[in-house]
């Protein structure tokens, strides 16, 4: 599976950068597979918060995950009139605390995301040697940044309405 290969390569490439990883935005930018996520965060006005916030966890969809959305979805979300919707979707990928994979019990837990409309929670499941987040597979876990942790996921997480 291509996404698994990207995740494995990403983990290997970032392993040598843990001493001076940079913030979440810098670390994601260096990886080269989060261009769409970073463009969306910039369009939503969230890039600075990801760069300067402390103790964050980001479930980061790859460019391939965004490409798997229906045609026109990303382009539509990047329009200024859809900024609130984009903020809600991106906020659904971020926790206001660090959550490393070794902190997960062998069952499903529910964790609150950062601000957004309403109380948003993600279902995080650790079972059978893998981790899923609202049905998305974590393909590379525990990528350290100076201000948090990135977990690479193979799908864009969409909050229910």
Image (cartoon, rainbow, N blue to C red):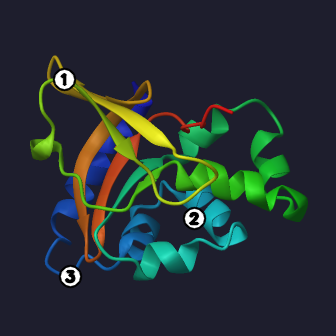
Numbered circle sitting on residue 38: 2
The image shows residue 107, relative to residue 85, as above or below, that is above
Residue 106: image x %, image y %?
A: 12, 25
Which residue is label 3 attached to? 20
The local secondary structure at tag 2 comes to: helix
The span from disc 1 to disc 3 (Cα, nearest Å) is 33 Å
In which image quadrant can residue 146 be found?
A: bottom left
Q: Residue furthest top?
A: 128
The span from disc 2 to disc 1 (Cα, nearest Å) is 31 Å
The local secondary structure at tag 1 comes to: loop
The image shows residue 126, relative to residue 85, as above or below, that is above
Numbered circle sitting on residue 107: 1
Image quadrant in which the C terminus is located = top right
The local secondary structure at tag 3 comes to: loop
Q: Mark 1 or mark 3, which has the lower sequence index?
A: 3
Which residue is at a point 52% across and 46% down the rendered structure image?
Answer: 119
């Amino acid at each position: 599976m291509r996404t698994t290969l990207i995740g494995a390569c990403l983990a290997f490439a970032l392993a040598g950068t843990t001493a001076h990883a940079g913030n979440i935005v810098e670390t994601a930018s260096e990886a080269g597979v989060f261009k769409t996520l970073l463009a969306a965060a910039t369009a939503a006005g969230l890039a600075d918060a990801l760069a300067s916030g402390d103790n964050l966890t980001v479930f980061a969809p790859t460019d391939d995950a965004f490409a798997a959305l229906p045609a026109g979805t990303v382009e539509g979300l990047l329009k200024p009139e859809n900024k609130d919707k984009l903020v809600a979707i991106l906020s659904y990928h971020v926790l206001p605390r660090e959550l490393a994979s070794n902190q997960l019990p062998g069952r499903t837990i529910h964790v609150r995301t950062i601000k957004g409309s309403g109380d948003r929670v993600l279902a995080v499941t650790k079972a059978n040697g893998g981790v899923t987040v609202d049905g998305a597979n974590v393909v590379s876990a525990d990528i350290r940044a100076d201000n948090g942790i990135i977990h690479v996921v193979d799908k864009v997480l969409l909050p229910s309405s």
